[in-house]
Amino acid sequence: MKGRLFQCFRLFEARLQRQVKVARREGSVPPKTPLTLHIVGQMALIVSDLPIPVAGTTDLDAIGLLEYPAATLLRALLLDIGLTLETDQHLIWMPSHTKYHPWYRGPLVRVDIADPLFVIASKCKFQRAKDRALLAQYFAVFPEARKIIERMRIATSWITP
């Protein structure tokens, strides 16, 4: 999935470049660029190549401002690889001090991936039963993460060791 997603962003970049050229040639307003997206949630964990099994997902949780034409284009490209773009930022919560790592860099599109620790913190905050096994495995491999997340005032006691 990681490679397909990366190729999707390359194609998104190429199509966005075409839209900009056409808009300039026609004298219309081109899409605002550069676009920066922060990938969070399960997909950020998948892309991070963690040493634990991470279940696949069909959602790509992204934080960033995408104008309607760019969002429509990205949604269509993601659908081609079986993913759905989630940009409803009111449904996404990440710690305010989340660290992001550069993942895709192009002239018009920049994609950063949330550090896994902060994705895990987000999952702890929501306390969903479906995440419990993943969180327990993460803490087994990265035991210091539990203390760091607890210092963020996010409960981890509901996750059995």
Image (spheres, rainbow, N blue to C red):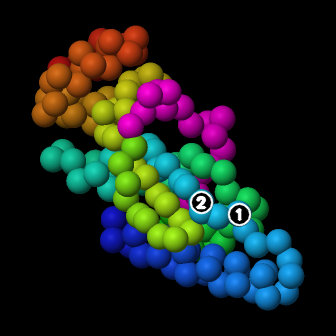
Label pair 2/1, CB-CB below 8 angstroms = yes
Residue 129 sits in which quadrant? top left
Task: Say whether residue 105 is left or right of residue 64.
Answer: left
Write the residue at 44% across / 28% down: 97
Under tag 1, what secondary structure?
loop
- Judged left or right of residue 47, residue 40 is right
The answer to which image quadrant residue 140 occupies is top left
Which percent across, then down, holds residue 21?
70, 84
Location of residue 142 with respect to 22 vertically, above or below:
above
Q: CA distance from mark 2 to mark 1?
A: 7 Å
Query: Where, quadrant-wise, is the N terminus in this rendering?
Result: bottom left
Q: Amino acid at mark 1?
A: Lys
Q: Nearer the viewer, residue 104 or 152?
A: 104
Q: Main secondary structure of the magenta part?
A: loop
Relative to 26, 72 lies left or right: left
> In the displayed structure, would residue 58 be above or below residue 88?
below
Q: Nearer the viewer, residue 54 or 29?
A: 29
**73 w.r.t. 160: above or below:** below
Q: How many marks?
A: 2
Q: Is residue 83 magenta?
A: no
Identify the disc placed on residue 35.
2
Question: Residue 67 at what x, y percent from top left?
Answer: 73, 59
Q: Disc 1 designates what residue?
A: 32
User: In the rendered structure, which amino acid carries the disc numbered 2?
Assistant: Leu
Q: Residue at x 40, y 69 (%)?
A: 6
Percent across and percent down for residue 57 are: 42, 54
The 10 Å Cα crowd at callout 1, few under 14, some 14 to 19, many 20 or more, is few
Q: Residues within 10 Å of mark 2 (few under 14, many from 20)?
A: some
Q: Which residues are magenta?
A: 84-99
Estimate the x, y position of residue 160 in percent, counting from the top left.
23, 19
Camera sees residue 42: no
